[in-house]
Amino acid sequence: MKLSEIKEILPALENIEFQLEDGTFVPEHFHVTEVGSVIKHFIDCGGTIRKEKKVNFQLWNANDFEHRLKPTKLLNIIRLSEDKLGLEDGEIEVEYQNTTIGKYNLEFNGQNFVLTSTTTACLAQDACGIPAEKQKISLSELSSDSSSCCAPNSGCC
């Protein structure tokens, strides 16, 4: 989800709820402690220099059980970040601590914001020497066509 998308969604909501993919919810007394821009400048294992830029939200679960972040407040924080930080319209990455700090993508299911898992991957598969994963085929899926294998009494073996 891009920053422009969340800005379109927030005015229509009465409350903000974040949900993990497994269905559990971030406690409703969470705080958005940071909104900013994160730039990752790196070199991949194939030697290509890369740069990623994302909008970052950090969610924090405090012991402030009376706290409820309203959509207008988050929208104001986003607008302030755009103004003071020059925040651009980019993909949102959410940091949230479960057992450790996790980085999540953000989606909206029509009712709640969903923190979706991110994964690592090799960006230079053609250069790093890792062989392509072989296709797994069950023996039962192989054709019994006699032209593709030896049939009994065919004389091929």
Image (cartoon, helix red, strand yellow):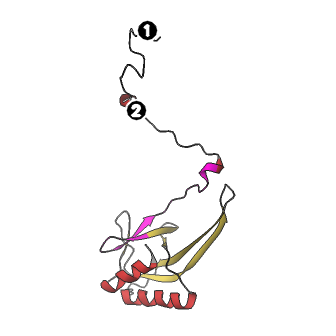
When asked about the image quadrant of residue 147, the answer is top left
Residue 110, magenta (yes or no): yes
In reply to whether residue 76 is colored magenta, the answer given is: no
Quadrant of the image containing the N terminus:
bottom left
According to the picture, the residue beneath numbered tag 1 turns out to be 155
Amino acid type at image mark 1: Gly
Instruction: Examine the rendered structure and indicate whether residue 136 appears above or below residue 82.
Output: above
Residue drawn at 47 percent across, 39 percent down: 135
Q: Quadrant of residue 16?
A: bottom left
Q: Which residue is painted at 54% across and 74% down in the image?
A: 54
Residues rendered magenta in the picture = 106-126
Q: Residues within 10 Å of mark 1 (few under 14, many from 20)?
A: few
The residue lying toward the viewer, choosing from 16 and 149, is 149
Q: Residue 60 placed where, x, y %?
A: 47, 78
* Residues at marks 2 and 1, CA–CA distance in whole angstroms: 26 Å
Q: Specify whether 46 is left or right of 89.
A: right
Q: Residue at x 45, y 12 (%)?
A: 156
Q: For mark 2, what is the residue? A: 138
Does 32 appear above or below 25? below
Which of label 2 and label 1 is nearer to you? Answer: 1
SS assignment at label 1: loop
Q: Secondary structure at mark 2?
A: loop
Left or right: 124 in relation to 100: right
Which numbered disc covers residue 8?
none
